[in-house]
Amino acid sequence: MAGDSSDYQHGAMDVSEQQATFHLVMGMTKWGSLVLAAFLFFVVLWFCTPAGFLVGALGGIVVMVAGVMLLREKPAPAH
């Protein structure tokens, strides 16, 4: 058996490593999705339209810059 129920104390465990892992995974998901979206936009403009490489590259850069501006960490409001 696992032991007495008195061994467990709610809220006593250090969860800093779990929080760090969560923030890492969320950051990788957020920034990875942005890179993937910019790359797909670039490839679609390059190969699927008559616009060509330069317009595709410019479009990908615009998507990347807009995404960085929208997805960056906002400063915490000071109260």
Image (spheres, rainbow, N blue to C red):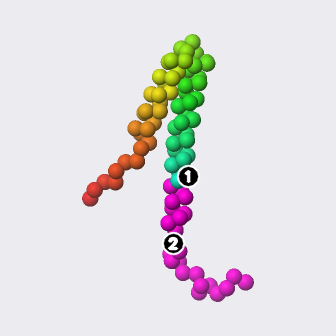
Q: Residue at the location (57% across, 19% down)?
A: 46
- Labels 2 & 1 near each other (Cβ < 8 A): no
What amino acid is labelled 1 in the image?
Answer: Val
Res 39 → quadrant: top right
Image point 53% across, 14% down: which residue?
51
Q: Is residue 48 above or below residue 21?
A: above
Mark 2 to mark 1: distance in Å?
19 Å
Q: Which mark is residue 64?
A: none
Q: Assess disc 2: are there few (<14), some (14-19) or many (≥20) residues with their C-alpha within 10 Å of its C-alpha.
A: few
User: Residue 28's spot in the image, x, y percent?
Assistant: 54, 47
The percent position of residue 1, horizontal first and vertical second, equals 73, 84
Outermost residue on the right side: it is 1
**At 50% from the left edge and 55% from the top edge, which residue is drawn?**
23
- Position of the C terminus, as image quadrant, is bottom left
Residue for point 67% across, 85% down: 3
Q: Is residue 32 above or below residue 64?
A: below
Q: Which residue is mark 1?
A: 25
State yes or no: residue 13 in magenta: yes
State the SS at label 1. Answer: helix
Across and down, in percent, residue 12 comes to: 51, 77
**Residue furthest toward the left?**
79
Decide which of tag 2 and tag 1 comes sooner along the chain: 2
Q: Element type at marker 2?
A: loop
* Magenta segment: 1-23
Total of numbered circles in the picture?
Answer: 2
Residue 15, position as x, y percentages in the image: 52, 68
Residue tagged by mark 2?
14
Instruction: Inspect the magenta stretch and tell me whether residue 42 lies in it.
Output: no
Crowding at label 1, few (<14), some or many (≥20) Cα neighbours within 10 Å?
few
